[in-house]
Image (cartoon, rainbow, N blue to C red):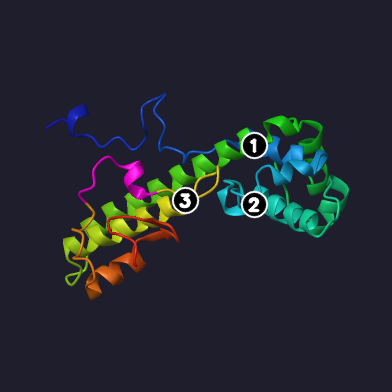
Amino acid sequence: MALTDSNVLKLAPDAGTPAYRNAPHNIEAEQSLLGAILVNNDAFYRVSDFLEPKHFFEPIHQTIFETAGSLIRMGKVATPVTLKTFVPAETDIGGMTVGQYLARLAAEATTIINAQDYGRTIYELALRRDLIRIGEDMVNVAYDAPVDFAPRAQIEDAERRLYELAEAGRYDGGFQRFAQLSRSRSIWRPKPSSGTASCRASQRACAISTSRWVGCSPPT
């Protein structure tokens, strides 16, 4: 019997259909922010309170941001000239050397006024990648869960990871509650009776700061 299109496995995707989706990122925003920092080191302090090297998508950008931040915090100047000595010289960046790439970043830098906006973009995209990672892990574990890993245990593990992600803080400072990110509060356990040992343990577990609590009353 002749094979038809309906029962032939297509190894290649149709034209115009991507084989996979890229993780959310914005290389241009990362380059613009790094360039601004190299041109004016004050731009670093506009984002240093919420942005970390791990929030950058490109590994080389993580290295540049971390190195520049270390120099600036030590009171030294971070420029393409001073920075290139701390990045492996053999690193190839799209056919450019480290020195050439750093000079290119500085030449095409954004203004310091836009630095915080670019930093927020980078930070928010990093959060989205973390959410995707958590979701992928949930799906994979659900398909191949160990015998002794009950579904309720997976729910609690996912709840913990989402809570930690929400608790990490906002780029405008302070902390936020996971409940603010989700209208549903079904994941929160019932509030223990006041004064019991379980309530005191819950209070320690759900403390976001010394004056803010989630799901229970602050201790007296």
Q: Where is residue 106 in the image (x, y as percent from the top left)?
A: 80, 37
Viewer-nearest residue: 81 or 96: 81
**Residue 112 image-quadrant placement:** top right
Between disc 1 and disc 2, whose residue precedes? Answer: 2
Q: Give percent across and percent down for residue 52.
A: 61, 52
Residue type marked 3: Phe
- Look at label 1 and name its amino acid: Gln
| Residue 175 badge | 3
Label total for image: 3
* Badge 2 element: helix
Q: Give the range drawn in magenta.
A: 177-186
Camera-nearest residue between 192 and 82: 192
Q: Name the residue under label 2.
A: 62
Report crowding for label 3: few under 14, some 14 to 19, many 20 or more residues within 10 A (C-alpha): some
As drawn, which residue projects farthest toward the bottom? 197
Residue at left 26%, top 59%?
A: 141
Q: Quadrant of the N terminus?
A: top left
Q: Which of marks 2 and 3 is nearer the N terminus?
A: 2
Q: In this view, does 131 lie above or below 200?
A: above
Mark 1: secondary structure: helix
Q: Mark 1 points at which residue?
A: 116
Asked if the magenta segment contains residue 116, the reply would be no
Dominant secondary structure, magenta = loop
